[in-house]
Image (tube, rainbow, N blue to C red):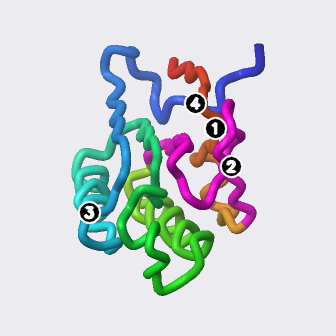
């Protein structure tokens, strides 16, 4: 098996790893301002987990403004902004970031199994700590 992309920051016993897991949608039902996502990023910055696993939907196909096409940008533009916000918002914490798609992600393939997100704009400084995985997937942390 290939070596896990996650290497520990310091040699710490596995029982001392902090893993934060959160599931979308990351928007309130009455808007797409991503306030819940902002709150989550504050928790990541404060608690500095070793690994942060976020499961979609990131831009929910069932959201009222998505269904009625009332977004101010295209689905892919809003989705890229969401990913950029997550990646930049977790950078200072140094957390390994795992992004898992959902069948309800409006800007992603809705086939099962789902391929990982495509994010060619991923900044070089984040490539070592951001992992885009398929759904379903198996994660081996330590």
Marks 4/3: CA–CA distance: 37 Å
- Residue 106 percent coordinates (x, y): 56, 58
Looking at the image, do the residues carrying marks 2 and 3 touch, with CB atoms under 8 Å apart?
no
Q: Earlier in the sequence, mark 1 or mark 3?
A: 3
Looking at the image, residue 19 lies above or below residue 100: above
- For the point 32% across and 62% down, the residue is 27
Please provide the residue range marked out in magenta.
95-120
> Around disc 4, counting alpha carbons within 10 Å, would you say few (fewer than 14), some (14 to 19), or many (20 or more)?
some
- Residue 5 percent coordinates (x, y): 65, 32
Q: Earlier in the sequence, mark 2 or mark 1?
A: 2
Q: Which residue reaches farthest bottom?
A: 72
Q: Earlier in the sequence, mark 2 or mark 3?
A: 3
Task: From the image, tell me which residue sits under label 1.
Answer: 133
Q: Secondary structure at mark 2?
A: loop
**Foreground pick, 134 / 48:** 134
> Around disc 3, counting alpha carbons within 10 Å, would you say few (fewer than 14), some (14 to 19), or many (20 or more)?
few
Q: Of circles 4 and 3, which is in front?
A: 3
Q: Earlier in the sequence, mark 1 or mark 4?
A: 4
- For the point 46% across and 46% down, the residue is 56
Marks 2/4: CA–CA distance: 30 Å
Q: From the viewer's perspective, is 30 left or right of 122? A: left
Q: Of circles 2 and 1, which is in front?
A: 2
- Residue 132 percent coordinates (x, y): 63, 44
Q: Quadrant of residue 1?
A: top right
Tell me the number on the disc at residue 7. 4
Tell me the number on the disc at residue 29. 3
Task: From the image, tell me which residue sits under label 2.
Answer: 109
Marks 2/1: CA–CA distance: 13 Å
Q: Secondary structure at mark 3?
A: loop
């Amino acid at each position: 098996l290939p070596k896990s992309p996650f290497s520990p920051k310091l040699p710490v016993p596995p029982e001392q790893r902090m893993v934060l897991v959160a599931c979308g949608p990351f928007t309130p039902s009455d808007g797409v301002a991503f306030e819940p996502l902002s709150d989550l990023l504050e928790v990541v910055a404060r608690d500095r987990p070793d690994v942060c696993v976020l499961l979609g939907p990131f831009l929910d196909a069932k959201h009222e403004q998505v269904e009625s096409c009332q977004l101010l940008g295209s689905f892919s533009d809003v989705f890229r902004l969401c990913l950029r916000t997550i990646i930049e918002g977790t950078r200072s914490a140094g957390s390994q970031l795992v992004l898992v798609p959902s069948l309800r992600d409006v800007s992603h393939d809705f086939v099962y199994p789902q391929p990982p997100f495509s994010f060619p704009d991923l900044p070089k400084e984040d490539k070592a700590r951001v992992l885009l995985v398929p759904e379903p997937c198996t994660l081996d942390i330590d």
